[in-house]
Image: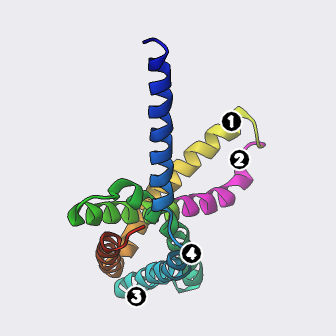
Amino acid sequence: MTDEAPANRSIVSSVVRRSARDRIVRALPTLRELAVGSPLWAVSMAISAWHALWLREHDATYHLRDILLLYAMGGLLAWPLSLFAARCLAQGRAFETRLAAFLLCLIAGTIGVTGCLFSLDYRVFYSQWHAAAGTPTWFFQFVFTSLSAFYQFLVLGVRLYLPLGATALVLASLWLAHSDGSQQR
């Protein structure tokens, strides 16, 4: 009887590992989804930022290219991560759950990646006044500069996703939730 217990645990752990591996493989975006979806999401986010700036009549034309590039790169990098995360969360679930997962992951992924890119750019600018790399002072300067930049992006940058980015988010999430339900992976 004691010999059967380790054998059963081995079989169960093997099945669990195989199940987790299959779930991850099914959640991976296809090359077509990456080749088409990432650039479309990137362009959508850049257009959203441009439109929001245009509506607010901001005098940011001398930085417009940089702003649009930031939002496009954020969208480009966030798409595959968000797609993977949403599919991991919503595999085999009802349409409403898939929709909520895609909404949540696309919002968090796009804002998170774009905010991190903004934070890195901010950090590069302020690094000229920081201590030598690797020192405890540098570490604190790095952490707090990055966190304050991310916070600044959340306060000032997220509004550039409105109104077009929100529309693109809902349309993309509806399409993805519907297509994931009809596909057999």
- In the picture provided, is 165 more to the left or to the right than 65? left
User: Distance from label 3 to label 2 (Cα)?
Assistant: 35 Å
Amino acid type, label 2: His
Residue 67 visible in the picture? no
Q: Is mark 1 on a helix, strand or loop?
A: helix
Quarter holding the C terminus? bottom left
Label 1 crowding class (10 Å Cα cut-off): few <14, some 14-19, many 20+? few
Amino acid type, label 1: Thr
Residue drawn at 32 percent across, 72 percent down: 173
- In the picture provided, is 110 more to the left or to the right than 98? right
Asked whether 57 or 88 is in front, the reply is 88
Q: Where is residue 161 in the image (x, y as percent from the top left)?
A: 38, 74
- In the picture provided, is 8 more to the left or to the right than 142? left
Q: Give the range drawn in magenta.
A: 116-132
The residue identified by callout 4 is 31
The residue identified by callout 2 is 130
Residue drawn at 77 percent across, 43 percent down: 133
User: Distance from label 1 to label 3 (Cα)?
Assistant: 41 Å
The answer to whether 63 is drawn above or below residue 157 in the figure is below
Q: Position of residue 83 (x, y in %)?
A: 44, 65
User: Distance from label 3 to label 4 (Cα)?
Assistant: 34 Å
The residue identified by callout 1 is 137
Q: What element carries label 2?
A: loop
